[in-house]
């Protein structure tokens, strides 16, 4: 079995994974929410006050996160459930976490060799934006910014 | 289509609702839907309730879906009840493990109602 370091070397710092990360998110939104995501540049620095995270362990270790606004997360829950959802409700956090879980699972299934050797944690959801996420490596995260119904959506993969 | 009592097992209540809606869209005549947030809760439910169909996630706290399917074989009430996995785990080894443990179908998340129909209706047809 390859070590995590072997995997890092072979995949050329993983920049080739960015399109897969974007495709993974697009598929989840199209199949589960009936929405098409659009590209978004530059990466927004404010207004992202809800974060869902799923840990990856095994052949690839890291954290995949999805960030957006709580208004946006409520709209996502509404589209998933076909019913209105209060942006402060547990249902919205549950839906947002599940979106992150599906993006992470879809992503690892697209990377050759990862589907078998990488496990996912259950999702964790953080609300608020006054926090910093510190990776234990120097490499910057792989990041994709997308637009969901005029709301910003940022998908990040921090590799440990 | 006969009346169906279904058990939906997923740690996400939102996903349980989506699965239920997909079953109804697939034309499954649901007369009762039981829900569990993990495999241990699901085992307790099937010991006390008769169900005709189980839809089950894999990655869940306390008891995961693969362990649940393995232990389900020892529940007299559950003999012959078809289990369809619905999960983000899409690798071939997970599919093989699930089917070896006794699952009759496997749907990868994200999914469409058509995929639920495609995988669930055949196992109900075999059962009935």
Image (tube, coloured by chain):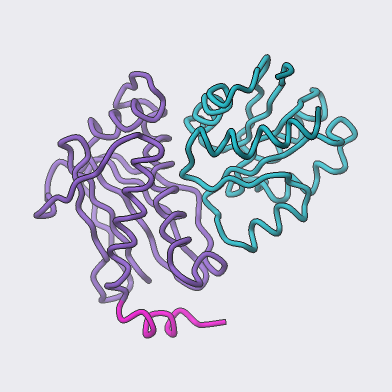
Relative to B66, does residue B27 appear above or below in the rendering?
above
Q: Where is residue B108 in the image (x, y as percent from the top left)?
A: 54, 48
Residue at point 52% right, 50% down? B88
**Residue B38 located within the stretch drawn in magenta:** no
Relative to B100, does residue B3 appear above or below in the rendering?
above
Farthest residue, direction left: A42
Q: Is the magenta stretch mostly helix, strand or loop?
A: helix
Point out the image quarter for the C terminus of chain A.
bottom left
Colour-to-chain, cyan? B
Colour-to-chain, purple? A
Point out the image quarter for the N terminus of chain A.
bottom right
Q: Quadrant of residue A50?
A: top left
Q: Position of residue A154 (x, y in %)?
A: 23, 51
Relative placement, left or right, of B71 versus A79 is right
Residue at point 49% right, 68% down? A114
Residue stretch in magenta? A1-13
**Residue A12 located within the stretch drawn in magenta:** yes
């Amino acid at each position: 079995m390859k070590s995590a370091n072997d995997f890092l070397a072979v995949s050329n710092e993983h920049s080739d994974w960015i399109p897969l990360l974007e495709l993974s998110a697009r598929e989840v939104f199209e199949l589960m929410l009936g929405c098409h995501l659009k590209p978004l540049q530059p990466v927004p620095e404010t207004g992202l006050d809800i974060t869902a995270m799923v840990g990856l362990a095994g052949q690839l270790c890291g954290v995949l996160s999805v960030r957006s606004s709580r208004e946006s997360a409520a709209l996502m829950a509404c589209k998933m459930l076909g019913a209105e959802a209060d942006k402060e409700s547990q249902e919205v956090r549950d839906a947002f976490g599940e979106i992150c879980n599906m993006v992470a699972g879809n992503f690892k299934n697209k990377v050759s060799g990862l589907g078998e050797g990488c496990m996912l944690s259950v999702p964790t959801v953080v609300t608020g934006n006054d926090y910093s996420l510190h990776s234990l490596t120097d490499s910057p995260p792989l990041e994709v910014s997308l637009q969901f119904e005029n709301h910003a959506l940022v998908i990040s993969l921090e590799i440990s | 289509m006969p009346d169906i009592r279904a058990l939906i097992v997923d740690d996400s209540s939102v996903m349980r609702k989506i699965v239920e809606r997909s079953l109804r869209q697939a034309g499954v005549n649901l007369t009762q839907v039981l829900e569990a947030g993990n495999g241990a809760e699901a085992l307790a439910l099937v010991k006390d309730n008769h169900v005709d169909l189980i839809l089950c996630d894999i990655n869940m706290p306390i008891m995961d879906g693969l362990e649940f399917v393995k232990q389900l074989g020892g529940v007299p009430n559950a003999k012959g009840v078809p289990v369809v996995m619905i999960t983000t785990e899409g690798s071939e080894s997970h599919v093989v493990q699930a089917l070896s443990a006794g699952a009759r179908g496997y749907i990868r998340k994200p999914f469409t109602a058509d995929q639920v129909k495609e995988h669930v209706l055949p196992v109900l047809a075999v059962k009935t």
